[in-house]
Image (cartoon, rainbow, N blue to C red):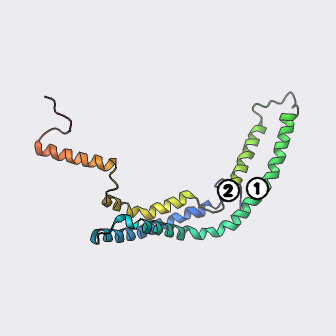
Amino acid sequence: MISTHPDRAAGLAFVGSSAYAFGPILFAQGAMLAGLIASRVLYRGDSLLSFKLWAGGFVAFFVFAILGSLVMFTPQMARGRRKGLADCGPLAQRYVEGFEQKWVVGDPAPSEELLGTGYIQSLADLGNSYSVVREMRTIPFGLQDISRLAIATAAPMVPLLRRSGRLKNSSWALLEWCSDDLTDAQLNHKPLGRGPQSM
């Protein structure tokens, strides 16, 4: 485990990204659920909102089924994070003590200027490395991986929202306005537009 790896997962972030290969399978499962819900709503008269807990549990179950097995890396990653903090802590302490003695408490040589010196950049790099270790995750996947798999599972159910009338956003309103305007213009042989006609 490399605790200072920039992916903040000890170099194992690629394991979480590999779960994207299951996206088509999750999409197919979501399509099956969407078809089942649609048949209940259309032919049995059930309310679409009565399936919201069912759909949410369905998405959560399949996302957990894909990513849950990756929790096996958690003990090793947790130990790697603790070891990284234990190793980087004394190193950072020694460096900042030397920096303070040289540039803050002590009097540097007249030929040495603080502006442009490499000590400042090294101090910033050390701080970044320590932040990477401190922010290291103990699971090889993040919220982005979870959200992408959840979207792939829930995407086939989005058209059902149109059936419930809850997707009446500005895009649908614009399309309906354009359709009605074009129909009126064809029937009345008038220019497009709903504004008042000038006399």
Task: Categorize mark 2 by other alpha carbons within 10 Å: few (<14), some (14-19), many (20+).
Answer: many
Q: Amino acid at mark 2?
A: Met
Q: Amino acid at mark 1?
A: Leu
Mark identifier at residue 136 = 2
Give the percent coordinates (x, y) of residue 130.
73, 50
Q: Quadrant of the C terminus?
A: top left
Q: Quadrant of the N terminus?
A: bottom right
Give the percent coordinates (x, y) of residue 5.
68, 55
Give the percent coordinates (x, y) of residue 117.
77, 34
- Apparent side of residue 67 relative to residue 186 in the rendered image (left or right): right
Q: Which structural element holds mark 1?
A: helix
* Residue at x 88% of width, y 30% of height: 109
Give the percent coordinates (x, y) of residue 83.
77, 60
* Residue at x 44% of width, y 66% of height: 53
- Apparent side of residue 123 relative to residue 22 in the rendered image (left or right): right
Quadrant of the rendered structure where residue 188 is? top left
- 25 shown above or below 94: below
- 97 shown above or below 139: above
Q: CA distance from mark 2 to mark 1?
A: 10 Å
Residue that label 1 marks = 85
